[in-house]
Image: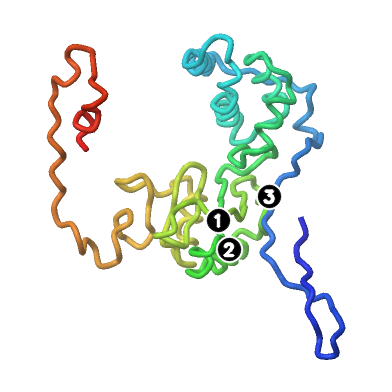
Amino acid sequence: MLSSIARNSVAASGRVVATKLATRSLAHTPSFHVNTPDNTPEQYFDFTEENYGRVKSILSKYPANYKQSGIIPLLDLAQRQNGGWLPVAAMDKVAQITGVKPSRVYEVASFYTMFNRQKVGKYFIQLCGTTPCMINGSEDIKQTIEKHLGIKNGETTEDGLFTLLEVECLGACANAPMIQMNDDYYECLTPATMIELLEACKAGNPPKMGKWGSLPMNGQVSCEGPLGKTSLFETPAPPKVDPDRFKDGNVDPASVKEHMAY
């Protein structure tokens, strides 16, 4: 991917000249495998006994002749067991379990950005740099992380604690700017609260998620505005649904909306 693009423009003299336009460069992993001392096909990987129980549970969700449907959840399981990244030996194990050629697994792992095919830190920071976050200060957050940790986009700290990667939209636009760290969302960030978060992680005590599975770092609750609740002050009553609507085991298609409380 080019770090800049060329656009033709007409100069005053009528000549066509090339103009450089700066673009945001996102770090990324090559789509092909590169052998490293800790990542070669000859190395050994196998699921733990506990995770084999999860493998069995995952595969039980699909017909026996469609084991390949479990490739994505099995890759996720392997990545979690292996400290947040997928060596090629783990991908080969998933191919063996699902009965497909290794290339079928490689193409899945190289397509989805949720899979890290190179080692990442204990705290994998994915910084959203898409428009809502950018206009709300994601560049300041990136510079804060880089300066505080001494790394650049796509790099890992020497102690192996942190990896920083700028990514596209993570779907928390209402609480921009934000990061995803491992599985958790930290939102409404400022340079000060970003440093606070990094220091808490260094101490091995990252802040716990809020009630709704994310943590705005400005004290607000989920997607409530900084002024708190300004619309709904009470929880709406749920729709009334007949608890015996399926007691006979049959559903009249004409009454589906009623059964679904529409």
Q: Position of residue 41 (x, y in %)?
A: 78, 24
Q: Amino acid at mark 3?
A: Glu
Classify residue 219 as left or right of residue 71: left
Q: Which residue is mark 1?
A: 127
Residue 78 lies in quadrant: top right
Report which residue position mark 2 lands on: 142
Pick whichever, 44 or 2, lies toward us.
2
| Residue at the outermost bottom position | 12
Circle 2 packing at 10 Å, graded few (<14), some (14-19), many (20+), is many
Q: Residue at x 51, y 70 (%)?
A: 135
Asked if the residues shown at circle 2 and circle 3 are in contact, with their CB atoms under 8 angstroms apart, the answer is no
Q: Report helix, strand or loop for mark 2.
A: helix
Please state the horizontal and vertical placement of residue 80, each as a whole percent of the image.
55, 31
Q: As rendered, which of 188 and 48 lies closer to the eye?
A: 188
Residue at far front of view: 254
Residue 109 screen position, x and y as percent? 66, 33
Looking at the image, do the residues carrying marks 1 and 2 touch, with CB atoms under 8 Å apart?
yes
**Tag 3 secondary structure:** loop
How packed is label 3: few (under 14 Cα within 10 Å), some, or many (20 or more)? few
Kindly identify which residue carries mark 3: 158
Q: Earlier in the sequence, mark 3 or mark 1?
A: 1
Of mark 1 and mark 2, the one earlier in the sequence is 1
Which of the two marks, 3 or 1, is nearer to us in this view? 1
In space, the residues marked 3 and 1 are separated at their CA atoms by: 20 Å
Q: Amino acid at mark 2?
A: Lys
Q: Secondary structure at mark 1?
A: strand
> Which of the marked residues, 2 or 3, is nearer the chain's N terminus?
2
User: What quarter of the picture does the N terminus occupy?
Assistant: bottom right
